[in-house]
Image (tube, rainbow, N blue to C red):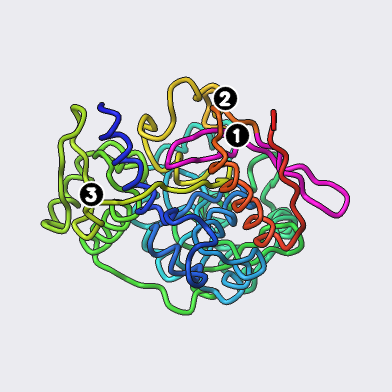
Amino acid sequence: MKVGDRRRLRRARMAALGLMPALGTAAAPVPALSVARWMGALQAQDYSSGVWSIGVRSGLTLVEIEQAVVDRQIVRTWPMRGTIHWVPAEDARWMCELLAPRVLASLGPRYAQLGITQDDVERAGVIFEEHLGEPMSRPDVLSLLADHGIDPAGQRTYHLVGHHCMTGLLCQGPLAGRQPTFVLIDQWVPLSRKPSREQAMTTIIERYVRSHGPVTEKDIAGWIGGTLAFVREALELIGDRITREDVGGQTWVSHAAATAAVDGPGGVHLLPQWDEFLLGYKSRDVTLPDEHVAHVVPGRNLVFQPTVVVDGEVAGVWRRQEGKGTVALDVTPLTRLTAKALRGLEASSAAYGRFLGRDVELRVEGD
């Protein structure tokens, strides 16, 4: 792919992902619900990574994002790929019902390893319906299952709770201290939307293309954990709101409402460990140079390092270190950072400090 084409695709993606302009330059913070609606879903398997994924796009603080959970605007649940995402509360049920069945159908061998029977699954569902009218912490859910004769040992509780989140029965509520809580969706969410299957298909695929494009059909299928047939059916339903372009031997899908030309660089960002910037794509060639892959994904196992992104391309990794009264951000550049990039890095670290409500010390290796 030509250098100019790759740069154009990167910048278009940064704009779609809500990462352009850089955090701190927007006129006002964006509500967490608006971010979740725009993105469709944001990876949130790791809590601290997931809240910063919203923070870096919204300008909201951690406290403000957690208030959006208390206010029942956004929730964490398992809509697709068997992993936890932030989604609009009103969409949690239908997203799980549409996208999770493929994962549920694949879990038989794992359940057999753990000794989870179909009777265990069904009884757990009844227990949850009877007792989770209010958010209950994970340790309390474990005790609840044990009190009703279901062995919660090992990973059994995780899988039983996850199963019923994927069916649309449960979702996560606010944190209880540092523990996640679980609650019945019908008790927690003021209103669950009930689109038809075709409406649901077009909604989730259109949100993804709009917020991640340009993408390939394989990117879309990988993100939802679905088939190419499903993706193509949805794209056909969306019709002329989708555009296609051949670049570098690939067909790229974008939303017709996307900005035709994205001017100017994409800024500098400190992105969390599991952000949609990388996790949202089947192929990461556009934004992650081959020579940096081993630094960003050391085990080649989808365990990513938090990334420094400059103009839409990974240029370093970083980690957070707790200090006395401050949080240290240790940055390891993977390429030479210009003076302009270093200034952008300082602005991004200050924004992260505002998000945390903490003093932050930026430490750049070799600087």
Corner quadrant of residue 277:
top left
Identify the image quadrant of the C terminus: top right
Circle 1: element type: strand
Query: Residue at left 50%, top 74%?
Result: 189
Residue 203 falls within the magenta-colored stretch: no
Task: Give left or right: position of 218 versus 182.
Answer: left
Q: Which residue is mark 1?
A: 317
Q: Are marks 2 and 1 in contact (CB under 8 Å)?
A: yes
Look at the image and give the residue range highlighted in magenta. Answer: 304-331
Residue that mark 2 sits on: 295
Residue in the image at 47% along x and 53% along y: 42
Depicted 303 relative to depicted 60: above or below: above
Q: Position of residue 275 (x, y in %)?
A: 51, 45
How far apart are labels 2 and 3 at the CA level?
30 Å
Residues at discs 2 and 3 in contact (Cβ within 8 Å): no
Q: Residues within 10 Å of mark 1 (few under 14, many from 20)?
A: many
What residue is at 48 percent from the left and 40 percent from the top? 310
Residue 122: horizontal and vertical position, in percent? 52, 54
151 vs 75: above or below: above
Question: Residue 254, which numbered label?
Answer: 3
- Label 3 neighbour load within 10 Å: few <14, some 14-19, many 20+: many
Q: Residue type at mark 1: give it.
A: Val
